[in-house]
Image (cartoon, grey):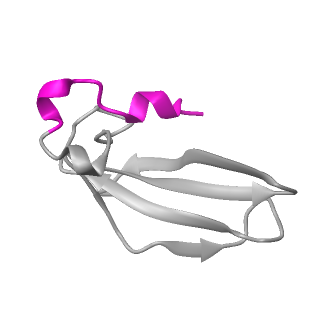
Amino acid sequence: MILLDRLLNHKDEYDSFPELGKNMVCPVCEFEYVHTELPIIDSCVGKNGCIKIPMYCEDGHAWELVLDSHKGLCGISVRNIKDRLE
């Protein structure tokens, strides 16, 4: 599993919009220009379902940022990493 800390850009020179918080980067190439698509509500681990946010970077990688909960525990993970051109 990708460590979420790796998704955060720790280079201060790229924080041109501090109101957004830390910039996310691609989990494959660490490119800082990433985009989101519309969130998807799905069934995952818990009975409450999960929220999947499809994301992609401008270098062509795609993945899902997933928020999942089960019995009061809430997790965040990166899943389904792939080349967007596939």
Above or below 7: residue 70:
below
Q: In this view, does 58 lie to the left or right of 27?
A: left
Looking at the image, how many numbered discs can be counted on the residues?
A: 0
Q: In this view, does 59 lie to the left or right of 72?
A: left
Residue found farthest to the right: 71
Q: Does the magenta stretch include residue 24?
A: no
Query: For the point 74% across and 58% down, which residue is it?
Result: 69
Quadrant of the frame with the C terminus: bottom left
Which x, y percent locates residue 10? 29, 25
Above or below 18: residue 85:
below
Above or below 24: residue 71:
below
Residue 59 can be seen in this image: yes
Residue found farthest to the front: 19
Viewer-proximal residue, 84 or 55?
55
Residue 60 can be seen in this image: no
Q: In which quarter of the image is residue 38?
A: bottom left
Query: For the point 28% across and 51% down, which residue is it?
Result: 20
Above or below 75: residue 51:
below
Which x, y percent locates residue 49? 72, 70
Q: In this view, does 4 lie to the left or right of 59?
A: right
Which x, y percent locates residue 15? 18, 36
Query: For the point 83% across and 70% down, which residue is it?
Result: 47
Q: In this view, does 46 lie to the left or right of 35?
A: right
Quadrant of the frame with the N terminus: top right
Which x, y percent locates residue 14? 14, 34
Please state the extent of the stretch shown in magenta in the rendering.
1-15
